[in-house]
Each structure stands twice: as structure tokens, then as C-alpha cells.
Image (tube, helix red, strand yellow):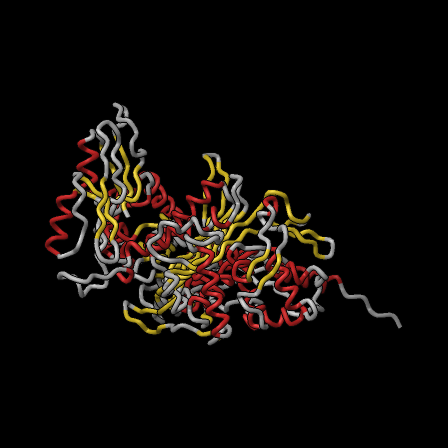
Amino acid sequence: MNATPPSSGRIWLVFVGLTLVGLGVFARIVIIQQFEGDRWAQLGEDFSASVRTIEPARGQILSHDGSLLATSVPVYDLRWDARCEGMVWDVYHEEIESFCEDLGEAVGRNATDIKAKFDNARQRGHRGALIARSIPFTDYQRLKESRFAQLGRYKSGLVFERRENRRQPFGLLAKRTIGIDREHERVGLERAWNEELSGQEGQILARKVAGNQWMPVTDDYLVDPVEGLDVVTTLDLHLQDVATDALEHQLRTHNAAWGTVILCEVSTGAIRAIANLSRVEREDGTAYWESYNHAIGTAVEPGSTFKLASLIACMEAGMSPNDSIDTGDGEVFFHGKRMRDSNHNEGGHGTLSLKEIFEVSSNVGTALAVKQQFGENPQAFLDGLQQLGVHKKTGIRFVGEGEPEVKTSISDKGWTGLSLTQMAIGYEVEQTPLQTLTLYNAIANGGKVLRPQLVEALESNGEIVKTYEPVVISPQLCSASTLAACKAMLEGVCDPQGEGTAQRVFKNSPYRVAGKTGTARIATRNGYEEGRYRASFAGYFPAENPRYSCVVVIADTRSGSYYGSTIAAPVFQQLADLIYATDPAFHTLSKGPLAQQRAIPAANDGARTDLMGLYDVLGIAYNKDVHSDWVKVQSGDTEAQLTELTIPEQGVPDVRGMGLRDALYLLENAGLRVVYEGQGSVKSQSITPGTPLRKELTTIQLRLS
């Protein structure tokens, strides 16, 4: 049966109905756009209000003495609500020109351009127009005092949004250790201690405006943000400055690729200075920057500084420091691979004791000693190294500590017949400079192994909320007899009267040093490249009562020099000299008003009569056989040593080590204009002492420290 087709009248009825509905929708759209747009836009804005997170002020990073290493500086962005319901337009018209001038001065922009932003926002009816970014705090305070801003946000439409800029006031000093505060890639202490520095977020009601931006609806917080804690580091800013300068000087002198130095307090494991500098080639010349933390993150073959661990393993297994090893002519073959001593061209060292092998850094002697003791059971050597913990990270709270590579089993991948003798002299192993220093610090600390420490306390508003005590990794590194032998060997390396590799470095030092030099060839994918070396020195001082340990590593020099004694040890010496000269703990008095003090106070070089008068008043002994007007000063254990300081008649005086007053007197009398920065004694001068005085030499720059 066929269906009856619909009548044409019904079809027309449906058509007319749909047409009317379409016309109604179209009419409604026109009405909304032309007549009700503002009302619906306002409703949209009202519904777009949401609770937004407010970042708290980030905590500061401080040095051991309270200096600011990293701090958050508040800056402000300015937005304007051109449709603010309570806008006082009379005041706006009267004050906007002067307000734009003040704002332009604050952000370095033209006042006319800023006024144009206000005009454009007003024409468009913008509710959150961005007028200016990064207004400094002092300028923000000044702007808030203007008549227009004093109306408040509901009568002026001005909304100041605070945010924080992270600054490091001391520039390159420990820059990579302090780190970078960025949301997705924090590094250094900024990352390792981010939880403590971050504080707790707050909440505020905000309204979404154009450009997916949010503008606070009110100045009041729903939840107040809690500022982050201040992190107090172990770093000593003065020592950090000296370490950085000494390292940079040596890197520049030898055109090295990179270098690092770490200074540690023996009894606590506190790191007092840590510098990392890498060479950067720029259009204006070579520069050295803290671009990577080699001290903590770079694991490399340590070379001869690892011999300490090798010989500890030998002595703990039964060898004596007096045992003799025949090193022959300084050349030996292990499984067809040649090993040489540095003096093989001179006939080698012949027969040496284990102690002498260490002092002269004989590769052949060290390898033969390890082979003699462990050749039948190489696993025992690896077990002995594990007892020292050299295969583990230090555990310092710092993200990115390099992984040491020290084989723990003869079944490990890469173990060959050469591995025993190669590991003995610091090859086929990798350690970071900090891991090397941890072993040497343990010897200085009577065998107690401490975890290196970069943070000593947390503070809030200047009040300590938590302190961090030294962490003992192992109470006893080795036996007492081995410990005593290690100390004697390390002292022998640096004994000015001995034959050690650092014998000349500390020849004139008023203190005794214990340490070890190291020189390692640099490995690449294609093997060891000829002429590329990494120099190092690790040790501690004073040798008889250690207070500081230090490691220096300098890589890939281009000067032709590469031995640890000539490249790395001088950096150690400069640090040690500075500490010895300025730390009262190294000096004592036996008579006079200052006899109860721990040391003769340090004094600047300068006028002899002034110094003598001061020493006489204080009862400090000094030599009186110097008659020149100007003298240099060295504070000894029992008296101050004065030596003649010659001032050239027609040359630039040497004012390094003087106080500013004496330096100004000499330089200005020589006809020079003096420009200086810093405070304290003169550390450096821009014109070399002795340079003949000429008319064009009108200005000399001094750096004080």
C-alpha cells in the first residue's frame, strides 16, 4: 500500500516557520551587538573572575658573614582600567601629563608615548591596558605619591602589579654555585634549596582581561603569601674574592680552558670558597665566566692526586712507608704498554721507599707498589678503595654532583690486565674535584670523613630557624699508623728542604703545607691527545694543625706549562698566604697590651713613623733598623717585620698593600689623578709600579679590598 504524499500546504507552513525562527535569531544577534554589547561584556568579565595564585617573595641567599649573594628586588608593572566605574576624570585631565612624565623617567620612555597608551586604552575602553613594565621600587613609591595615583585603583583605574627580579649583587663571585632562579631550569643553590627559598603561595581574586592577562579585582589577599626563608651559606665573601682572582690570573697566564678551586674548613667540612671559571672567546677578547660548576659537576681522571688513595690501600693491606721499590730508569712496561716517570730522560729515580715514591710522584713506583701488593688478588685493591669511599658521591645537597667512576669489581665492564696499574696512578677512574678534596680533608681531620657543606643555616627576618651541623660520613678513614704515614708523605711533598714535587712552591711560606700535585693527560674519544693536560693540587695547611683544605684543578693550558706544581699549586699558595696574613688565629703576642689577643693585628704598608708610633702605643714588638720613610709590613708570630719600600722619584709608586690615605698622598704628589673603588687596602693599580711618569699618565685606577 503506497503512502500518501504530504500536502503542499503543510510544506509551506514548515518553511515559513523555520524562516521566522531564523529571522528571530538574526534579529537577536543584531540587538545584542548593537544595543546590549556592553551589558553582556560586563557580565562576561564578571564571570571570568577567578582565584589566582600570588607568588611570595623569594628568600635571600647570604654569605657566611651576612653579605647578600642573591636577593629578590621588587619591580612593578602598571595596568590601567579605562572603564573604572569611580573614575575621577577631572583629576585625570589635570594630572595625566605630569604622571606620564614621572612614569617615563622611571622606565626610560618618552612621556608622549606613555600618554598615547592611556589615550588608546580610553578609546578602546580597555579594562587592563599594560602601560609600563619593570618599574623600580623607589620609582613605584614616588609614583604612588602622585595626586592621580592617590585616588586609589577604584577612582584612578591604576593597578600596580608587583613581581620579583632575582639579582646577584657580587656578579661573578660564586655565580654558578649560587645558581639561577628560573621556573623550569633552576640550577645551583637556587635549585637545591628551592623549597626553603620559595615560601608559600597566596591567593587573590583576579579578573581576566584582554590578551589572556589577569588583573586583581581588589588589593586584599584571600590568602596572604608567606615569604621564603633566607639561606645562609658557608661561603666567606673575602676568601671567595681572593680565590676567584687567583684562579682567573692563573687561567689567563696559561690560557687554560677552565679551572676550579675549592677551599674547605677542615673541622666542619664547610666550603668557604668555590670558584669555577671557563674560557669564553668574545669579539673584545678572551673572558672567563662562571658558566659551569666544574668543582661539583665535572668528573675527570684525577691523575696523581689519586695516588694517595692507592697507597692508603697498599699500607692498609700491610705495606710500610719504608718499603723499597726499584723504579729502575723510570720506564716500565705493563702488558706491552709503556709507563714513564717525568725524569726518565735523566735515568729515573732508582730505588725509592714508598714514602719517597709519593713525594716525587713516581708513576712507575706507585704502579709497581700496587702490583706487588695486589697483583695476585686485584679485587682486594678495589675492595680497599671502596673502604675509602672514593667510589661514592659526597652526598652534598646540590643537584648535579658528578658520578665518580671507580671500578668495584674485576668483573666490571672495562676491566683489563692494565686496569690495576692504570688505576694506581689515577687513570681509568674519574672523580670530581670536590670528591678528591673530601679524601684529603679526611686526612687533615684525623681520619674523620665529613660531607662537604654549602649551607649552614636558614633564617627568617634575621632570626635563625634552623642550623646544619657537620655530617660525618665515616668516623675513621683508615688505621692510625696509615694516617700518620699519609700526613708525613703529604708534608714531604711540600717540604722546602725535601725533594717533593711542590718543594719550591712553599719555599718562602711562613707556614707548612701538606699536599699532592697532580698532572693528568686529557682523554678524548680518540684517546689521549699529545700536549693536553690537566694540572691539580690538593692539600691542607697548616700541616701541623690543619684548619683549611683546598683543591685546585686547571685544565688544558696553552702556555706550554702543565705540571700541577707550576699551574695549580700557586693558586693554593695565594689563598693560603691571604688567610695566614689576615686570620688572627695564626698569630700570637707574648707581651704588651695586646698580649691576650690571639695575633698581631694585620697592618697596611705605609708611612714608617705612623706605624712605629702605633706599635709603640700598643706594645707590639717590631724591628727598628729600617729608616726609610715608607715601609712594607709582615706580621710575624712575635713581632712585626718592617722592610724598606723604595718610592721612585720619576716613576709610578707601588701602593699595593697600602691604605687609601697613604696611597693618595704618594700618587697625588706624583702628579696623578686617582680614581678608586671598594674599601680597605689597595689590591691593584692600573699603572704598573715603576712606570716612568709622563704627561699623558694623568689618571690611575685603584681597586681596594
Q: Where is residue 704 in the image (x, y as percent from the top left)?
A: 27, 45
In depth, the one of 19 and 36 nearer the eye is 36
Looking at the image, which residue is at 54% across and 55% down? 361
- The image quarter containing residue 600 is bottom left
**Location of residue 628 in the rendering, given as x and y in whole percent from the top left corner:** 18, 38
Q: Is residue 627 above or below residue 448?
A: above
* Left-right relation of 108 to 276: left
x and y percentages locating residue 480 in the rendered image: 47, 74
* Residue occupying the far top of the picture: 695
How far across and how far down the image is residue 345, in percent? 61, 44
Residue at point 41%, 64% (across, down): 454
Front residue of 550 and 2: 550
| Observer able to see residue 31 | no
Q: Name the residue located 53 percent from the left edge and 48 percent from the top edge.
A: 555
Q: Quadrant of the N terminus?
A: bottom right
Tell me if residue 280 can be seen: yes
Residue 703 left/right relative to 195: left
In this rendering, is residue 665 above or below 275? Answer: above
Along the line of sight, the residue nearer the viewer: 636 or 181: 636
